Image: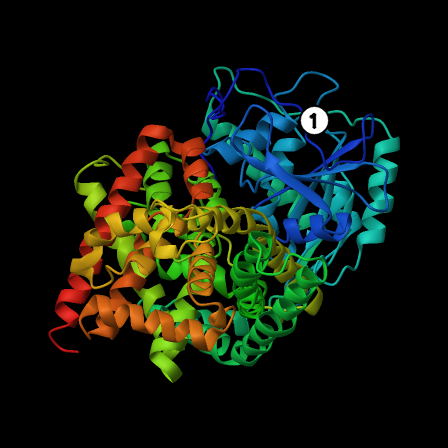
Amino acid sequence: MSEHHTNRPLALNGPAAVPSCHAPGTGGGAGPGAPVVALAGTPNVGKSTLFNGLTGAKVTVGNWPGTTVEVARGAWRELACTLIDLPGAYSLDPSSPDEALTRALILDVPAGEAPDVVIVATDAAHLARSLYLVTQLREAAVRVVVALTMVDVARHRGIAIDADALGEALGCPVVAVDPRRRSGLAELTAVVRRTLAGPVPAPRTVIRPDPVDDLAIEDERFGWLERAVTAGTHDSGHTRASWSDRIDRVVTAPVLGPLVFLAVMWVVFQITTTVAAPLQDGLDTLFSGPVSTAASAGFAAVGLSDSWVEGLVVDGIIAGVGMLMTFVPLMALMFVLLAMLEDSGYLARAAVVTDRLMRSIGLPGRAFLPLVVGFGCNVPAISATRILPQARQRLLTSLLVPFTACSARLTVFVMLGTIFFGKYAGTAVFAMYVLSIVFVIGVGLLLRKTLIRTLGQDPLVIDLPPYQRPTLRLTAAVSWQRLQGFLRTASGIIVATVVVVWFLQSIPAVPGAGFAEVPVVDSVYGVLSRAIAPIFEPAGFGQWQTVSALVVGFVAKEAVISSWAQTYAVTDPNTTGSTVALGEQITQAFAISSGGHVLPAVAAFMVFLLAYTPCIATLAAQRREIGGRWTAIGVVIQLVVAWIMAVAVFQIGRLFL
């Protein structure tokens, strides 16, 4: 099951002090002095879903003090205690920073600092494998409660579980729960309450060989575990293949698997770009019409008509943020579709499908999981590299994550796809995501042969959850959580960026002009953009308005759209907020800069946008994980790859289009 590393040091950053579940200042709990309950378990057993069900998803997520590992923490709604969602772990013998923190918070802590109860989420359909954590915990003085998930899947496979008998054999309470449908949570709450009130049980008696023999210890654990499983389960003997197994024969096949994955993602992008279009048009009409008109009327009423204040609000904030907000329906639909794929169990199969591809660049198959997260947002994807056991694997994956097409880039891709590719917009966006995978593989191979040559190989170990019908509650909760992150960006970084850009556009760079009275082309913003623009002439988009959007996009990719909107709004007040007028302005800019080869220039721009540095937040996450030196190297790699590929796309494309 696992390799025993009794004397292996913890892979934690920061001071040598052992972290504590009762550490102050971590936030999100039930308050000082409240009992602490830790939620542990292997990946893909429903642990985080159970955590959200018990806390109502009102949680804080952040780095644990003294480490770089993120842990969710919240207040148990029906119990006056703090619940901590520990990183997924197959064993308490750590092979990654995540597993090291799980062990540290449960076992390697002073008296009184450990969690008061540890709940182990366990897959009833794969009981022996999931209970290994319980085996190790029962060897320590720890209160343990087993939460059985996937009971319906086990029943379908002919496995009946007697929770009482299993609990007696394990020496701890066992409760069946269904986190997705919120059933069994009341029983779990009652059991944990009783467990908190009871004494700490004595550790399971284990005869240790002298001298220590790791294999003998493992054999004893598995023997005890097998006897417990036998006592608590009854197998009817029906071993017919489930419909999940039959589907997996297709979706995880070496040839059909990748084709199915690409087809699924194409459908996702096609639905996203077509269904969201009418909603985007409606929001665009709202911001460019009633909202802008009402704001102008308000300024006129207080005597500030045609003032710089009106320009900041109408041409800056409303034009910039308003244009970005029209993409909220698009993002919401994308998040819903991805949440459904995740809840159904399909995305876990993607790691199996891409295992061989990952190994070609020296990474294990589970490195695909952080990369999948990167298609949503690069920042948590960088943090997710902690699941990898080797430091150089984490380094390489962190350098590759920025090449995944995050949802912020999606807004720009969809806008350009709608303007220039019409009914083929979905296919154009899908092509960017396929190219993103090509970049990950290509840059990975390049780094493996140059800067990062030594990489170990680990077998892919992943639990494939059974296919399930996505639930409305879980899909809505996950989608809303991700949409909130997008909205926070729009209301935070984007507003600040819009204001800074507007001020730069208002500061004259020529003598004799007043503040906010100069054309954008003669402002500090315009002069700086014109100075940079020649660098991109070989790529076909050397127009200063286009280049300035890329510079602003270094802060956040969503700002590319807001930068365009406010640049053209200030240039021509009649274009404020209008998608049609903005599209015409952008089309004209590409036509001029490309010498009439518009589509190759647009494709080159999209390629550059895909490959260059995602945002400042990603750089901050990289610096935290891999250090400033490697982060700087990564930025150079991204810019060089982006420029070379953009030039190649335009120069080749102009020969045919």
Quarter of the figure with residue 650: bottom left
Q: Give the residue displayed 19% in from the left and 53% down from the top.
A: 534
Q: Is residue 566 above or below residue 491?
A: below
Q: Is residue 96 above or below residue 618?
A: above
Q: Give the residue displayed 61% in from the left and 32% down from the top.
A: 136
The percent coordinates of residue 277 (x first, y second) are 52, 78
**Residue 319 falls left or right of residue 28:** left
The percent coordinates of residue 112 (x first, y second) are 75, 19
Q: Does any portion of residue 444 appear in the rendered image?
A: no
The percent coordinates of residue 10 (x first, y second) are 49, 23
Report the colour scheme.
rainbow
Q: Nearer the viewer, residue 489 or 24?
A: 489
**Residue 394 falls left or right of residue 439:** right
Q: Residue furthest bottom?
A: 423
Q: Specify the quadrant that holds the C terminus.
A: bottom left
Q: Nearer the viewer, residue 592 or 102?
A: 592
The percent coordinates of residue 584 (x first, y second) are 38, 75
Total marks shown come to: 1
For the residue marked with disc 1, what is the amino acid? Gly
Q: Does any portion of residue 597 appear in the rendered image?
A: yes
Q: Nearer the viewer, residue 293 or 222?
A: 293
Q: Is residue 491 above or below residue 392?
A: below
**Which residue is denoted by mark 1 in the rendering?**
25
> Helix or strand or loop: what does disc 1 sit on?
loop
Quarter of the figure with residue 194: top right
**Residue 533 falls left or right of residue 465:** left
